[in-house]
């Protein structure tokens, strides 16, 4: 069976994607700084983008590469050092993949790389005051000139040279991933332990989200469908505003009494610093292109996604 080489394979998305690929009969290899791990189902290979090292055997054995690696954007405050780590982890790892593919004889057919909807700026004024907004940004929109926009631009530019090596490239600009394991959804649920539905800022900012199962299926779909190439927005077709998401989640989790509490923007700015800009930003992103490519969402609405995540 084909071999899929995954960078960032130990993260939330990478672990689930590995499970799905194994269930479909693929062989999976994972690049890690702690190479040499033993597993009956997965092979591990060493790499270190900071030192420009990758085990050539990892590249030589792969049929597909899924590139997920990158320091967590929301894991720490955005100090100058952390911002350099966020951007550098993406550009250095992308450059290493391109370099390895150019040096090591290989049979890689396709590279599917993560990117993020941080590429886009805020919605135009007046479009973020309804529960469900218009279609929003498509893939042709330019990168927004802020930290995340520039990081995404460099990230995508770093992996694009694989096309000059004759490899098909698919880039998935990923929205807010809804998963119980980690990320924003897990944070949204925390206050509900205390019966508090914490609505961020005004609550009117649009969230372009995707269920983690749909995201992993999109990676597999991109691998398996040669007609796919270029950039696609990896978001569900029905974005919602923060207030709608939080109240639907509260209703499902609490099944009874809860208190809606608006967390003011100034509090978020004090706690999160510059990162609060992204938390409060309204970004409506369009899923039409990936739908037109034939991908079918299991969880196209927030109700279906929450029902899956909160039985």
Image (cartoon, rainbow, N blue to C red):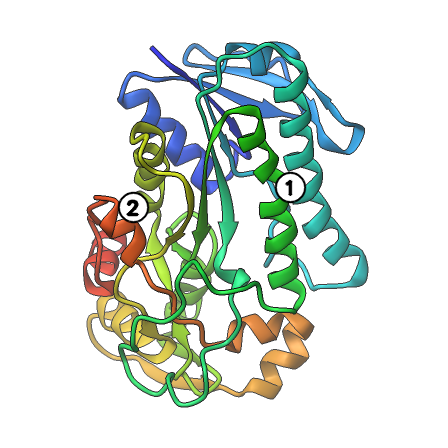
Give the mark nearest the N terminus, 2 or 1: 1
**Location of residue 100 by image quarter:** top right
* x then y, percent, for residue 189: 39, 64
* x then y, percent, for residue 91: 68, 43
* x then y, percent, for residue 135: 30, 71
Q: Is residue 216 above or below residue 18?
A: below
**Location of residue 18 by image quarter:** top left
Asked whether the residues under the numbered discs 2 and 1 touch, taking CB atoms below 8 Å apart as contact, a structural biologist would say no
Using the image as rendered, state which of residue 301 and residue 172 is in the foreground: 172
Using the image as rendered, state which of residue 93 and residue 163 is in the foreground: 163
Residue at the spot 44% in from the left edge and 41% down from the top edge: 13
Of the two numbered discs 2 and 1 in the rendering, the one whose residue sits closer to the viewer: 1
Q: Quadrant of the N terminus?
A: top left
Residue at the spot 20% in from the left edge and 70% down from the top edge: 255
Count of labels in the image: 2
Label 1 sits on residue:
158
Q: Is residue 153 above or below residue 46?
A: below
In this rendering, position of residue 197 left or right of residue 39: left
Q: Say few, some or many: other residues with alpha carbon within 10 Å of mark 2 (under 14 / 14 to 19 / 20 or more).
A: many
Q: Is residue 237 above or below residue 12?
A: below
Q: Is residue 262 above or below residue 101?
A: below
**Location of residue 253 by image quarter:** bottom left
Marks 2 and 1, how far apart at CA? 26 Å
Q: Secondary structure at mark 1?
A: helix
* x then y, percent, for residue 79: 77, 63
In this rendering, position of residue 182 left or right of residue 75: left
In this rendering, position of residue 260 left or right of residue 77: left
Q: Say few, some or many: other residues with alpha carbon within 10 Å of mark 1 (under 14 / 14 to 19 / 20 or more).
A: some
Label 2 sits on residue:
214
Q: Which mark is residue 23?
A: none
């Amino acid at each position: 069976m084909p071999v899929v080489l995954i960078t960032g394979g130990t993260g939330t998305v990478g672990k689930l994607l590995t499970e799905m690929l194994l269930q479909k009969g693929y062989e999976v290899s994972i690049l890690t700084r702690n190479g040499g791990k033993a597993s009956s189902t997965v092979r591990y290979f060493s790499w270190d983008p900071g030192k420009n090292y990758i085990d050539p055997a990892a590249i030589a054995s792969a049929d597909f590469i899924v590139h997920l690696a990158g320091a967590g954007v929301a894991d720490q405050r955005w100090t100058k050092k952390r911002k350099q780590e966020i951007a550098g982890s993406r550009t250095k790892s992308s450059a290493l993949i391109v370099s390895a593919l150019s040096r090591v004889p290989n049979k890689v057919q396709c590279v599917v790389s993560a990117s993020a909807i941080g590429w886009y700026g805020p919605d135009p004024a007046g479009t973020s005051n309804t529960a469900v907004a218009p279609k929003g940004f498509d893939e042709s929109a330019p990168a927004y000139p802020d930290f995340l926009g520039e990081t995404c631009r460099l990230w995508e530019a770093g992996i694009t040279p694989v096309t000059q090596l004759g490899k098909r490239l698919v880039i998935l600009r990923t929205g807010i991933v809804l998963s119980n394991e980690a990320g924003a959804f897990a944070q949204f649920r925390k206050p509900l332990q205390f019966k508090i539905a914490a609505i961020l800022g005004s609550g009117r900012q649009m969230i372009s989200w995707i269920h983690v199962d749909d995201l992993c299926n999109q990676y597999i779909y991109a691998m398996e469908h040669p007609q796919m190439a270029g950039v696609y927005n990896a978001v569900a077709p029905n974005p919602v505003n923060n207030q709608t998401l939080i109240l639907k989640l509260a209703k499902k989790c609490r099944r009874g009494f809860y208190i809606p509490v608006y967390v003011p923007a100034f509090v978020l700015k004090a706690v999160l610093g510059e990162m609060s800009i992204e938390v409060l930003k309204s970004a409506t992103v369009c899923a039409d292109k990936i739908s037109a490519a034939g991908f079918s969402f299991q969880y196209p609405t927030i109700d279906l996604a929450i029902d899956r995540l909160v039985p």
